[in-house]
Image (tube, grey):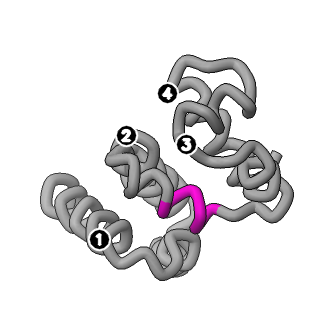
Amino acid sequence: MNDAEKLIDLLLTYYNVTSVSQLADVIDIGQPALSKWKKNNSVGAIKKKCRELGIYNEIFGDINKEIGDVLVESAADNNDSLRLYRVALATIGDDLALRESFEAHIKTWIRENV
């Protein structure tokens, strides 16, 4: 399952619908577009639509915490936190708001735990 499929599953759950066709109706997009998002792993398109719908934080909000938790656990196991931090930032990509939020989360964690 690619990232777009996981996000579409989150949207199905968020909107309490069971099919891609129903989701397409709810978010006012063509069903073929949703299928294309899945096929092409179009995370950027899903992010854009979530922003338009005003649900970006609901769908992507916990990503910072999850990435941070994995980063911290892995760093404790591997003593390679800088490499993991860079991997996490690469995973976030060019989304400036998400990057800033992630960095703030990490800084807070460091202040509280180091």
Majority SS type along the magenta span = helix
Mark in front: 4 vs 3: 3
Cα distance in 3D space between marks 3 and 1: 33 Å
Q: Which residues are magenta?
A: 43-48
Mark in front: 1 vs 4: 4
Is 114 positioned to the left or the right of 5 in the image?
left
Crowd around label 2: few <14 · some 14–19 · many ≥20 (10 Å): few
**Quarter of the figure that contains the N terminus:** top right
- Identify the secondary structure beneath mark 4: helix
Q: Nearer the viewer, residue 114 or 44?
A: 44
Mark sitting earlier along the chain (3/1): 3
The three-letter amino acid code for the residue at tag 4 is: Tyr
**Dot 4 corresponds to which residue?**
14
The three-letter amino acid code for the residue at tag 1 is: Glu
Mark sitting earlier along the chain (4/3): 4
Residue 54 x %, y %:
32, 47
**Dot 1 corresponds to which residue?**
103
Instruction: Tell me if residue 45 is in the magenta stretch.
Output: yes
Mark in front: 2 vs 1: 2
Crowd around label 3: few <14 · some 14–19 · many ≥20 (10 Å): few
Crowd around label 1: few <14 · some 14–19 · many ≥20 (10 Å): some
Query: Disc count in the image?
Result: 4
Residue 36 x %, y %:
80, 57
Cα distance in 3D space between marks 2 and 3: 18 Å
> Which residue is located at x 75 percent, y 43 percent?
31
Q: Is residue 58 visible?
A: yes
Residue 56 x %, y %:
38, 50
Mark sitting earlier along the chain (2/3): 3
